[in-house]
Image (cartoon, rainbow, N blue to C red):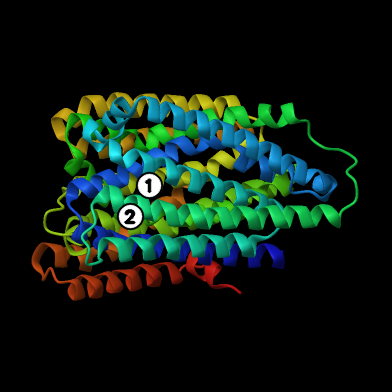
């Protein structure tokens, strides 16, 4: 348990550093480049995230699933290089497709065939992210969580430091030039991380006994294949609206929407860290047949996630438009309903991620795929129907609706897998406390100053009220989190 607590703390710290740096990158980019270029930057990032599971063939999860035990340690080096070569082949195929049809690809991604010079940096970033993600999967399987955290922090500082140097520099580089230089630094760092993982795997092979059992290569591929579809469906539910916004509206609209999403995605760090800790523990209890413990942990995880997320989501729903103008520029505008709906979407998706672990442990992968496909279909249909009439509000409404639908269906599936019920009463109490605590911020937004200092003071007061209301209860979540 102490090892688990240490690993969680290290990983959580690394994720927090990465999210904070990404958060402070928002005002840097929105003030240094045009809104159209910022829209192209975000399109590049989400396109890379879409192609990642295809290039890696789901190996990031497969490696952790099959190579985290000492029984197969001696086979790691062979599989490390075999899987890497397959991923390299898939990347080459992807690169050939992009370079063979640059015009249509550029139009599909950026809504403009003239953006073709951005495609080579995009491929470089895809190679860098895929190599780093693959290497970190092997480091995690080897129990080197400290190295995973160090890699995440190093990539974060390098990523944002290079962007700062290139974008704010005196030379005034065009976007294709500075994006290519940025991608080059990421590729070099990813190569170093890959070499580090290869060295760790090779060293473990030397000190380990021969395996008594090892997975077959075809078994690895069979396990990985459904993960690609699940990743793509999840991606469609979360990011396909950007591509529709590009073609139905323009890159500037994508920039405004992406900036709002960046603010509203702050609570996502909570379910990322909870998931990193929760899934291995749930798996251990599940394998041992301790299903009551699984139910208890799921309820605690949902309560903790909502306790941390709801006040932040409510703050963003209330003060989002003003925060966007403070952190970006006055050019970046999004209506209050956009922030409210996006906050609901992020909260719902986090709850779904927690419920997903129980469904996967119960072997309900086909139902999970069906759920993801249904959510993606609903999201696509709502985006096509709502964006032309409502713009950014329509895209946010589609995201919130599809994610809430996933949560409702996932709750039903979880109840079929376990004797478990969603903590509705506690969730409503958390929401009521958050609403009551938000009154100072609501009054400020309605009648008070719009300065950053006043907003920060009102937010701090609301947070204090929220914590105080919870602390008075015997089943206080704040006191649970404060325990050593």
Q: Nearer the viewer, residue 168 or 367?
A: 168
Residue 292 place in picture, x, y as percent? 69, 46
Label 1, secondary structure: give it. Answer: helix
Q: Nearer the viewer, residue 118 or 257?
A: 118
Q: Which mark is residue 56?
A: none
Q: Residues within 10 Å of mark 2 (few under 14, many from 20)?
A: many
Q: Residue at x 64, y 40 (%)?
A: 84
Residue 41 place in picture, x, y as percent? 30, 47
- Which of the 4 image quadrants contains residue 469? bottom left
Q: Residue at x 43, y 59 (%)?
A: 307
Residue 47 place in picture, x, y as percent? 38, 38
Would residue 243 be visible to someone looking at this image?
yes
Label 2, secondary structure: give it. Answer: helix
Distance between mark 1 and mark 2 Cα atoms: 8 Å
> CB of mark 1 within 8 Å of CB of mark 2?
yes
Residue 156 place in picture, x, y as percent? 45, 61
Would residue 305 be visible to someone looking at this image?
no
Q: Residue at x 65, y 67 (%)?
A: 6
Mark 1 vs 2, N-terminal side:
2
For disc 1, the marked residue is 346
For disc 2, the marked residue is 313
Quadrant holding the N terminus: bottom right
């Amino acid at each position: 348990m102490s090892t688990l607590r240490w690993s969680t703390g290290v990983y959580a710290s690394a994720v927090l550093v990465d999210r904070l740096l990404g958060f402070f990158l928002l005002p840097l980019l929105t003030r240094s480049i045009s809104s159209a270029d910022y829209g192209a930057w975000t399109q590049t990032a989400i396109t890379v995230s879409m192609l990642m599971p295809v290039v890696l063939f789901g190996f990031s999860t497969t490696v952790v699933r099959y190579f985290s035990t000492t029984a197969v340690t001696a086979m790691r080096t062979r599989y490390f290089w075999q899987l890497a070569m397959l991923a390299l082949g898939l990347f080459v195929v992807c690169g050939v497709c992009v370079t063979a049809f640059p015009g249509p690809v550029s139009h599909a991604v950026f809504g403009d065939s003239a953006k073709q010079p951005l495609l080579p940096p995009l491929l470089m970033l895809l190679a860098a992210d895929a190599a780093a993600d693959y290497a970190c999967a092997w480091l995690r399987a080897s129990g080197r969580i400290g190295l995973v955290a160090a890699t995440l922090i190093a990539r974060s500082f390098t990523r944002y430091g290079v962007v700062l140097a290139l974008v704010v520099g005196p030379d005034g580089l065009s976007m294709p030039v500075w994006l290519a230089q940025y991608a080059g630094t990421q590729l070099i760092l990813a190569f170093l991380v890959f070499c580090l993982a290869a060295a760790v795997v090779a060293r473990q092979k030397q000190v380990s006994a021969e395996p008594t059992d090892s997975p077959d290569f075809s078994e690895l591929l069979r396990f990985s294949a459904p993960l690609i579809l699940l990743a793509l469906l999840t991606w469609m539910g979360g990011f396909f609206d950007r591509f529709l916004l590009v073609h139905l509206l323009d890159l500037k609209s994508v920039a405004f929407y992406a900036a709002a999403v960046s603010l509203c995605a702050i609570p996502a760090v909570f379910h990322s860290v909870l998931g990193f800790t929760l899934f291995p523990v749930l798996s251990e209890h599940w394998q041992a047949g301790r299903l009551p413990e699984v139910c208890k942990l799921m309820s605690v995880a949902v309560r903790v996630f909502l306790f941390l997320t709801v006040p932040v989501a409510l703050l963003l729903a209330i003060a989002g438009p003003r925060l966007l103008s403070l952190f970006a520029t006055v050019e970046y505008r999004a209506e209050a309903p956009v922030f409210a709906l996006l906050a609901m979407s992020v909260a719902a998706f986090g709850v779904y991620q927690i419920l997903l672990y129980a469904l996967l442990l119960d072997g309900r992968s086909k139902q999970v795929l069906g759920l993801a496909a249904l959510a993606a279909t609903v999201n696509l249909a709502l985006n096509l129907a709502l964006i032309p009439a409502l713009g950014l509000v329509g895209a946010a409404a589609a995201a919130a609706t599809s994610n809430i639908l996933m949560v409702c269906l996932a709750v039903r599936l979880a109840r079929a897998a376990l004797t478990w019920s969603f903590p509705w009463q506690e969730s409503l109490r958390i929401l009521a406390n958050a609403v009551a605590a938000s009154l100072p911020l609501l009054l400020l937004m309605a009648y008070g100053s719009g300065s950053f200092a006043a907003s920060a003071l009102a937010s701090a007061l609301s947070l204090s009220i929220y914590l105080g209301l919870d602390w008075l209860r015997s089943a206080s979540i704040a006191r649970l989190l404060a325990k050593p």
